[in-house]
Every structure is written in C-alpha cells, then in structure tokens.
Image: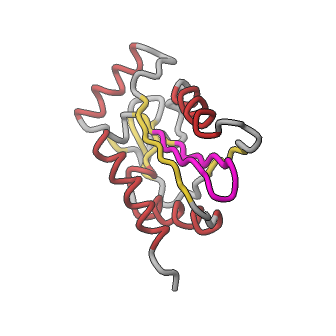
Amino acid sequence: MPGSLPLSLSQLEVWRDQLAWPGSVHLNLGGTAFFEGPLDLPRLKRALSQLVAENAALRLVSQPDGTQRLLPAFEPDLQVIDMTGYSEPRQAMRDWWQNWMRQPFVLDGTPLWRFALLRAHDTLHGGTIQFHHLIMDGWGTTQVMKRWSTIYNRPER
C-alpha cells in the first residue's frame, strides 16, 4: 500500500500475537491518575493536541495487512465522562477504568490509543490513557503521561 511503513521486528511479533488472539485485550496497557484541584478542560485538550503533534507513535495507525502508516497530523479525541452523583467517585472511576481496559483495539487503520477524563466534580477528575502494545510499552506510557502534564502546566503564550 502506498505510504505504508513496515512494522519493526518487535511490532511484527506483537501484531502476530494479536492475530493469534483476535478480540483479546492482553496487549492493552495504560495508566491512570487522579487530578485534584481545578482543571481547565480546553487547556487539557490543547495539551493533548500538542502531545499528538509532537509524537509520531501517537500518529501511527496499523493496517490490516500488517503494515502501518504515519499520519502527518491527527486531531485527538479526549473522551469526557460525567461521573457526578457517585457517593464514592474514586471507586467509580477505578471501576470505569477496569471496564475500559477490557475494550479491544481493532487493527483497522485507526489510532491504537485512547485518552479519557472522568469528571466527579470541579476539583476531582480522573485521567486515563490506554494503548495497544503495538505502539507503546510501559515505560513509554509513563513518558506520555509526564509529557502531557508538562505541556498542560507550562505557561501559555
């Protein structure tokens, strides 16, 4: 396919593993954090857009034929989930995260990551990121969360 890039050897092994277990979530990984204090949602979304623009791994899309494409640009979607009304919002967020991690990725040309913000109230949010192991590993996951936070917290020009 024009514009396709081959998978690295490590990626090829992950892709074959996923093919052997279609619909399995054993290659999903991610991270979560509670955000305490006021949160500027438009700023968080802009920080996510900047994060995706900076990181080629977040613009890689897997093709059904075992290749990948690098998108020149991609506008990310930050899911915002309303968790108001729960008597134990932190536990409700943990439960939501666990269920979300059970959602398989489809190797169909769409990005292999998801970002979500769970809102309990004005000063309690839960952030979560999820990746398919085809594009990210555990160390990379922590670096993505750290960089997103850095972009969000830097002074705006």
Residue 118 lies within the magenta run: yes
User: Which quadrant of the rendered structure holds the N terminus?
Assistant: top left
Q: Is residue 140 magenta?
A: no
Q: Nearer the viewer, residue 157 or 68?
A: 157
Residue 65 is situated, as x and y percent measured from the top left of the image, at 43, 29
* Residue nearest the observer in this picture, 65 or 51: 51
- Among the 4 quarters of the image, the one containing residue 100: top right
Q: Residue furthest left?
A: 9
Q: Residue at x 41, y 18 (%)?
A: 19
Left or right placement of residue 121 versus residue 1 in this view: right
Drawn side of residue 41 relative to residue 131, left or right = right
Which of 107 and 35 lies nearest the eye of the viewer? 35
Q: Residue furthest top?
A: 20
- Dominant secondary structure (helix, strand or loop) of the stretch shown in magenta: strand
Magenta segment range?
114-130
Relative placement, left or right, of 83 versus 6 is right
Tell me what residue is drawn at x 49 percent, y 66 percent.
50
Up/down of 157 relative to 17, above or below: below
Compared with 84, 124 (above or below) is below
